[in-house]
Amino acid sequence: MMRRYLLLMAACVAVALAAVAGAPHKTLRQWGFPTGIFAPGPNNAITDVPGVTVGHVTLIEGDSVRTGVTAIVPHQGDIFRKKVPAAIHVGNGFGKLAGVTQVRELGNIETPVVLTNTLSVAAGIEGVVRYTMMQPGHEGVRSVNAVVGETNDGRLNDIRGMHVTPQMVIDAINNAHGGPVEQGNVGAGTGTICFGFKGGIGSSSRVLPQSLGGYTVGVLAQTNYGGILEIDGVQVGQRLNKHDFIDHVKKVENLDGSCMMVVITDAPLDSRNLERLAKRAMMGLAKTGGIASNGSGDYVIAMSVAPGNLIDADAKTITSTVLANGEMSPLFAATIEATAEALWNSLFMAEPMTGRNGNHVDALPVEQVLDMLRNRSPVRVGIAWQRSADNYRRAMMAIRAAGGEPVLLDQMRPVGFEYDSTGISDRYVDRDGVLLQPYADIVKRDTYHGTAADEVMQGVDAVVFLGGGDVSSTLFAQPQPWHAIAEEGRADATRDVSEYLTMAYCLDHDVPVLGLCRGMQMLGIVSGAPLIQDLDTYYRTMGKTYHHQHRMPRDAQGNRYYTPHDVTVTDRHSLLYSITLADTIRDVPSWHHQVLGDVTGTPLRVTAVTPTDGVDIIEAIERTDKRFALGVQYHPEEAVRKHLDHKPDATRFMPLDEALAYFKALIRAAR
């Protein structure tokens, strides 16, 4: 029997190598579609939780055997002597999960968790028991609560042959390792089917920000369930019915099946809150379109491996520190996210398979699904952090009207800077609120590196930078003293720093950006352009007259009011011209007293100006080295607001469709 098993393992290796040599398999995230708001760990797998390892034995023989074993080892000590706080939630109980009653009674798990097929649960139990009894110091052990889960792989696998042996279970445990987790047609997922496509093993993780505890949640799933497939909000199952793949969906005889989900965290949780955590994994299953049908065994096993809370089997009393109920919500959200992504990954990493009686199951049509995801609407458009609710409202109206989904971005904060309840600490700014030069130099030198930028930008497809007050002059490529007549009063260094870091991140990662007024100036500043701090003063120094075309004069009645003027497009080969299709852009809403200076020597290209008394004031800039990096010195979002709010003066400004064109172009670039 052993010799036969070794031959099977060799065959499995050959099959795996052949698969790798064919087409590359990628997870949903590796295809460029991150999901959720929290970042994954380095492996995006359950092994991101410290000490957790995973092992597989994959059994493929002839044309009928398609099954295996997956073992999840929660920590690297003696699990029987240092038991793991645990809970089990039953989403739908049509299954054969072994060990559940003792876990519910005592609130802990004392063995590795093993997954296999339905009729091999007995072999799984025997393998776990034998593994536990053979460990040093366990010579007197006479009771072992083996936790063994299953799904039914009988369509592709000769399940009645009961080909899994206890030794295979022991080997899976002994071969468990950290790092990347093999996914798809491996281990217990070798013969499984999910939504009518080839399922398998999937895994994912989430790491909470330090401000929320910094804990890691990892999930591993064995997928063999049905429903109506949904991926990151896209109704894939329904849309496939309209394509040539409808037959693949109809091949499924019913929606029954099973799904095993294992959730492990290093957060210090007791069994009560672990059960609450386990319930959230079912919400992750629901996000994928799973329905926990009548004949489906849907189980969640949740464990906490916080070192200080492992349960000493010989202790007379136990003292532990656990998170309060009020701290659970971020972990709930992380569990939902990681579970859904693990389930999706099982589909993306699987391969087509032919098994028992010639039954064939196709893999998920990845290219077609990716097209659906790429072309989905709406695109998530981030709005760079600032303080004005009215600014947010205008931008959100424009983004939604253009078919996008607005996302209010969090602040980006430099590493090591101190913040209080109002923003950046006063010790970093001068009496005018301007960021002090030494700290501005740090921001320009380090930009977003080492910050929470990836978390802030998680799932964001494009970013809009809005208008507002004057930018701290210390952040300019050529720093200047703060102008004494700056119109907006004190500078807002908190916003200045956050926008600088956000813009730098977007440009480095080629995230499409649209800068409006101050936003254009920030695009210029980060790209190395100088800034003219006050147009009126600038004109006087040249002996010229500034006619306040870009906003009403300071002493005019209704000063805080947009004024319309025309803009001349200077380059018909520009991004701006492709949006406006006009040599002159009429009646743009304008409100500014600062403007970019000479951009020579920077990666910027000037694409529109307003001639004023012999001086061309820059009205639009672009970065041709990026997918979409456009800045305009006016406010199309204000024109959108006036038209949608039916303001009486809306007709004084550019038409609604012309104003929306900027946002629609941004969204097209982000698809």
Image (cartoon, rainbow, N blue to C red):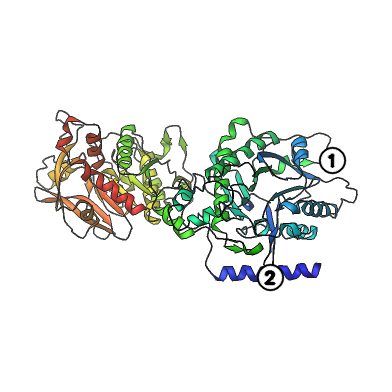
**Residue annotated with mark 1:** 314
Instruction: Give the distance between the C-alpha atoms of the residues marked 2 and 1, in whole angstroms.
Output: 45 Å
Label placed on residue 11? 2
Q: Amino acid at mark 2?
A: Ala
Is 581 in front, or is 90?
Answer: 90
Residue 471, position in %: x, y? 30, 42
Q: In the shown orientation, is residue 237 left or right of residue 662? A: right
Give the structural element (helix, strand or loop) at label 2.
Answer: helix
Q: Is residue 17 above or below residue 526?
A: below
The reply to whether residue 524 is visible in this rendering is no
Q: In the shown orientation, is residue 499 left or right of residue 569? A: right
Q: Is residue 22 above or below residue 243?
A: below
Q: Is residue 176 above or below residue 269?
A: below
For the point 75% across and 54% down, the residue is: 120
For the point 63% across and 47% down, the residue is: 259
Is 193 in front, or is 59?
Answer: 193
Residue 641, position in %: x, y? 25, 35
Please rate how many residues cluster around mark 1, counting C-alpha atoms within 10 Å: few if below 14, some from 14 to 19, many from 20.
few
Query: Which quarter of the picture shows residue 275?
Result: top right
Label placed on residue 553? none
Q: Amino acid at mark 1?
A: Asp
Residue 82, position in %: x, y? 78, 45
Q: In the shown orientation, is residue 563 left or right of residue 149? A: left
